[in-house]
Image: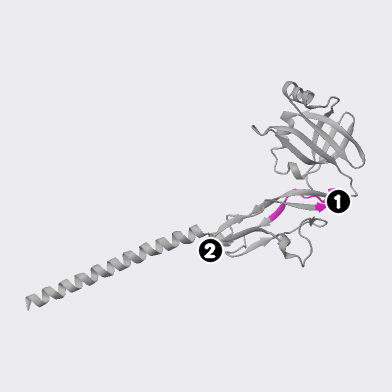
Amino acid sequence: MATQLTLEVTPRELTGSGSVGRMRRNDDEVPGVVYGAGADNVNISLSTRVLSKAMQSDTFLSQIIELQMNDNAERVVVRDVQRHPANEAVTHIDFLRIREDREIQVAVPIRFVNEDNCVGVRLGGGTITKNLIEVEVSCLPRDLPESIVVDMETIDVGSAVHLSGLALPEGVTITGLGTSDDTSRDLPVVSVSILRAQLDEEEAVEGEELAVTEEGEAVTEEAGEAAATDDAADE
């Protein structure tokens, strides 16, 4: 299960773009909302500094978060983060309440391990291409993983790992995979291949080596002809 993070939030009475803008400027806080699970929406605010620190974690968007609000605590997941178009500062955040008996859909990061030991790179001279860096999964809150791990060590040149090949914890499914008969949704996650640029470079090197070889043979042949001409002249 993903590690639980705890954030302290404050109920927010005032709404509207004007009051929210003043709050961000004067109080250094980010507005947000908590909703879902059949309960009323609650407008909140939380420290910009605390939120920025929490968001440095790669698993922030894929973990269960406990919101401490006065004497109450609610378990939530992040549903949306809005940012300023110019400076990327967080301007609003949405939290969805969770229920322990209901599955949730969360985008979980994919973590690639043993890339340096990948046989396709180390012995085959290939390049790793990552097509996906996260995948949406469905599971009960208690089964939510921090990440999905892909071990690259045994992946050879010309091979790929698809969604259906991911090692999932018990109780976790991939929401977009569909049925086993529908292979169109079984997207490649990562592959190892020889890129076109690598092939072009290898062909260029081989061309240069061939030119050098041919030039050397030509020089040798010319030297042989010159020697034969000298011998004939001596006779």
The residue lying at 81 percent from left, 38 percent from top is 95
Magenta residue check for 32: no
**Badge 1 element:** loop
Q: Which residue is mark 2?
A: 124
Circle 1 Cα neighbour tier, 10 Å, few/some/many (<14 / 14–19 / ≥20):
some
From the top left corner, tell me how far across and down residue 214 is, in percent: 31, 68
Q: Which residue, as the protein is rendered here, is positioned at the far top? A: 26
| Residue tagged 1 | 103
Cα separation between marks 1 and 2? 42 Å
For this orientation, the residue located farthest to the bottom is 235
- Image quarter of residue 15: top right
Relative to 5, does residue 22 appear above or below in the rendering? above
The magenta-colored residue range is: 138-149
Instruction: Check the image and report above or below for 164 versus 132.
Output: below
Residue 144 is a magenta residue: yes
Q: Amino acid at mark 1?
A: Glu
Q: Secondary structure at mark 2?
A: loop
Please indicate whether residue 95 sits to the left or right of residue 216 in the image.
right
Looking at the picture, how far across and down is residue 204, in whole percent? 41, 61
Q: Position of residue 5 (x, y in %)?
A: 78, 39
Q: Residue at x 40, y 64 (%)?
A: 206
Residue at image location 86% in from the left, 31% down from the top: 69
* Residue 39, visible in the rendered structure: yes
Q: Is residue 232 left or right of residue 32?
A: left
